[in-house]
Amino acid sequence: MRVSSKLLQAVEGHHYLDLVTDEAKYRIYLMNDYVIRIRCTFDEQFAEEASYTLAMTAWDDKMDGMVEDRKREEALPAQYEDLGTHLLLRTNQLRLMIHREPFAIEITDAEGRVLHEDLKERPYVKDKHGRLYHYSNLTDEDHYYGFGEKSGHLNKKKRRLRMHNVDTIGYDSEHTDPLYKHIPFYIKFNGKTQSATGLFYHNSHASTFDMGCERSGYWNKYSYFCADGGELDLFFMYGPQIKDVVRHYTDLTGKTILPTQYSLGYMGSTMYYTELDRDSDQAILNFLDRCKAEGIPCDGFFMSSGYTTGEDGKRYVFNWNNQRFRHPQNFIEQMRSKGAALAPNIKPGMLLTHPLYKQFDEAGAYIKDDKGDKSQTDRYWGGAASFVDFTNPKGRQLWKDQLKASFINLGVTSIWNDNNEYEINNPDALCEFEGGKKEISALRPLLPNLMAQAAKEAIAEAAPNTRPYIVNRAGFAGIQRYAQTWAGDNNTSWHSLKFNIPVILGMGLSGVANQGCDIGGFFGPAPEPELFVRWVQNGIFQPRFSIHSCNTDNTVTEPWMYPSYTPYIREAIQLRYRLIPYFYSLLYEASVLGSPVMRPMVYEFQYDPATWEESFDFMLGRSILVANVLEKGAETRTVYLPEGSEWIDWHTRERYAGGQTIRRKVSLDSIPMFIRSGAVIPLAPYLQNIHNDRIEELHLLIEPSENASFVLYEDDGVTNNYKNGDYLKTTINVETDGNTVISFKKDGAYASTVKRIVIDLVCNQIAPVQVMLQGRKLPMFLDPAEWKAKEEGWYYDLELKTAKIKYDNSQADYEIAVNFDIKDLISI
């Protein structure tokens, strides 16, 4: 075992500091005031910088031409002070101390509060098997969040977690580990100091996090990271807020790609239709017609891999089964006419009997065996298969050619990448690695990212101005730059419904804002009616909203599967569509700041200890608290309302102080939601299809008891024109000092489709006495019917304590002034 125990030498390089110890070498970059890179190798020299992952660097990297929009920053000068027992480096926010003997690194904030401490006497270790360890001190006040796609409660303290993406069909969302994603990043939040920090281990070997599960009386309490190979290359990030850490992490690995707007609609799916003997195309078209007849909006369909079935019953990617889909292009055009996108299932493993196998094999496009002589084969759906090597330019090009010929040239620009965990059992199988040759064990979780990147590039080449919509099951850190994700083949149970929530919340904290899970459960018997209703009521708040199933009892999960319960399903999905402008604005925020859409309570309220362990209630953006009913037969729901805000029941407008737990009665149609004080929530009340409907009337739900701001984002939703300024960002500012002023400031060239604005202004104690639009008094109505018939004006809904203000939209900046002065009727 090799352990760094003594600092021997420090050498200042160009914007970095090199350290030599008795066992390992280190290189430290002060990336900026908040982010520090610590790179460690036990070899004679550092390996070449070659990252598919990083979106921000401060050095030359072999993959600079591969990573689109990579930002090159200049690191801060790494000048140190020699203080005898230790060296000291400074940024405006951080102090990094390098202890000489025993060697260890300690990081504090500018006031000296400890943020990170290596475990002295074994901070960085390499064992005889080549495994690398990094040990960190742990305190009783620490909470650990993130880790990508992980089962169980949100806080992962005292958990041991494996990073190794696997196809885990029918997994237990509380206990199964690992799952499909491999994201070696976590957030540490210390409740005592109220400081949040992050650690990202830039290493794609299989690895393990132990967050205090292991204990030894000879050492301080500790956590550790262990990787099967590579280097210990870690990035430390300082908040002090959790949301700051997420922003810094997504600066490093990339922001969530701005999606097509229609991807926020209901996406139908089931394996059942594509496994019919024939006419699967008509089954899907009939599904769309049935949705319309039932009043259930739908904007697309994820087409399972049965469409690829050959005459031998095996699945062959890029192959259309002509018994099930007689005229693919005609089918795609019919779907488009019905306002629905098609997302075909694509798999990177190609069976040895695949008609295209020889072409890919002769081109050297597959991952090779450990000698580099032959294509590696392994278990896959239907038998032995080889796997496309996306680190090989030849593999990428052949794959893109087939994507174009089979789908994109037919009008398909939505791609569903599935079964891409790359479960190759020979760890020494060789990837091309852009000519550098590297074992699959070092690159495995990166291949799903590169697969998504290839789809993005193929769409850009064949349809340059079409915004791609790519969905991935597997992935590594940075997958958010290319794809929406989902939590794989979940089990159909109440347990899955509940524990899929913290799985999604952990992904959001790990930079992946656009994701979800299969609604209704993928694997198992059909969900019982109550479970199905509750799952849909929860699923409407997930960025990816798709009911998808592979039921084990010869049934298919459809919105109308239980006719007497269909009204509950319809009502929930229609609520989802009302929220589309809010969702789209939140995903724009994610594309700029990295913010999650579904947010754990601790993300918004880290100063409230009651939120630190909350795993199931969550915030949708800043403004909506969602407390779904997750228990069978529930008649009441207990909800904790965090302190620091006031809360208004979405349905009744009853107002509650924060910092208390309430209990409310629930029925099968209940979707418990609470509006946060200072909320600004845009809604589309009449939207039924995102492809075909124009949002001409926009409702703004505003709670004005505190100053607030929200950016409403609009563009055409389908092209890349927004990159050239064809967007509209409307910053809505709410200022209150007894009276309320709502200002609208526009930025961008996009011509909004919104013709009319209706503000639902949630009032507290009293009604307005006057409403002014740009200094002009709007008419006030006592009769709601009369207000409804007019083009502009306002009235006060006494039951809901809401002022409803209506006027024509303006392309210019403007403001609404609402006067709450008491009108003295007696003195008049």
Image (tube, grey):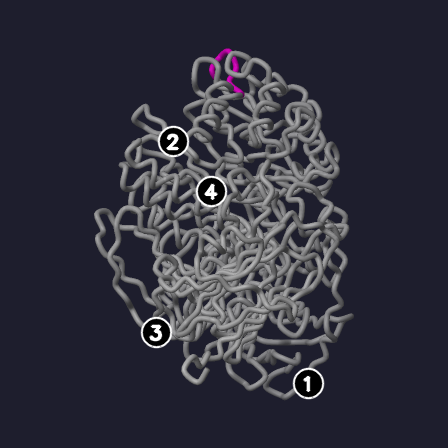
Judging by the rendered image, the residue that carries numbered circle 4 is 545
C-alpha gap between disc 2 and disc 4? 13 Å
Q: Residue at x 59, y 34 (%)?
A: 415
Magenta extent: 308-313
C-alpha gap between disc 3 and disc 1? 46 Å
Q: Nearer the viewer, mark 3 or mark 1?
A: 3
Judging by the rendered image, the residue that carries numbered circle 2 is 558
In the current view of this chain or complex, which residue is farthest to the bottom?
83
Label 2 or label 3, whichever comes before in sequence order: 2
**Residue 234 makes an appearance in the image:** no
Q: Is residue 378 above or below residue 657?
A: above
User: Residue 752's spot in the image, x, y percent?
Assistant: 67, 50
C-alpha gap between disc 2 and disc 3? 40 Å
**Is residue 814 highlighted in magenta?**
no
Judging by the rendered image, the residue that carries numbered circle 3 is 659
Q: Residue at x 26, y 60 (%)?
A: 664
Judging by the rendered image, the residue that carries numbered circle 1 is 81
Judged from the image, the secondary structure of the residue bearing numbered disc 2 is loop
Judged from the image, the secondary structure of the residue bearing numbered disc 3 is loop
Q: Residue at x 44, y 20 (%)?
A: 275
User: Residue 712's spot in the image, x, y percent?
Assistant: 60, 58
Q: Is residue 380 above or below residue 31?
A: above
Q: Are marks 3 and 1 in contact (CB under 8 Å)?
A: no
C-alpha gap between disc 3 and disc 4? 32 Å
C-alpha gap between disc 2 and disc 1? 66 Å
Between residues 105 and 469, which one lies in front from this camera angle?
469
Q: Is residue 101 above or below residue 68?
A: below
